[in-house]
Image (spheres, rainbow, N blue to C red):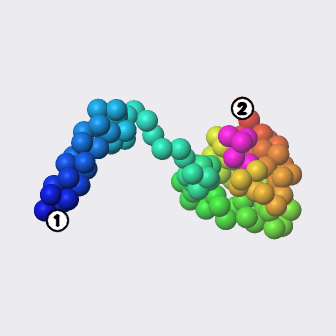
Amino acid sequence: MESKSRAIASLVLVLVVVLSVAGLMTPPVVVAHEQPPQSPIDDIEKCWSSIFNVNGCVLELYRSVFSGKFGNVGVACCKAFSTIDTNCWPHMFPLNPFFPPLIKDNCAHVVPE
């Protein structure tokens, strides 16, 4: 029985050595400059971040959405809205794709470029 245990232990040791030499048991290497892919939540947070940084801007935008009056958006909010990448708009306003261009048009009158 003892010889069987030694044989199994020796076989396992040989197998580990062979796999290590073949490179099959090396731990995965993570390169320091690689970053994990961004999740959609991270992207949405980035999209909303400029608006959340302006006090009252989110409320101004929601009032505009629900009232249909786009002239109620202030200068600071318009400046923040103008910094948002157009790729963000479908994620920020999925139910109303016409809203961002309307706000942008109104903001062009409020904050001339």
Which residue is rendered at x = 79% and y = 41% of the image? 109
Q: Which mark is residue 83?
A: none
Per the image, the residue denoted by label 1 is 1
* Circle 2 Cα neighbour tier, 10 Å, few/some/many (<14 / 14–19 / ≥20): few
Examine the image and state in which quarter residue 29 appears: top left
Is 37 situated above or below 21? below
Q: Which residues are magenta?
A: 85-89
Mark 1 vs mark 2, CA separation in Å: 88 Å
Dot 2 amino acid type: Glu
* Among the 4 quarters of the image, the one containing residue 41: bottom right
Q: Could you say which quadrant of the image residue 82 lies in?
A: top right
Which percent across, then down, holds residue 73? Answer: 73, 55
Which quarter of the figure is the N terminus placed in? bottom left
Residue at 29%, 37% in the rendered image: 18
* Secondary structure mostly seen in the magenta stretch: loop
Indicate which disc residue 113 carries.
2
Q: Is residue 41 left or right of residue 64?
A: left
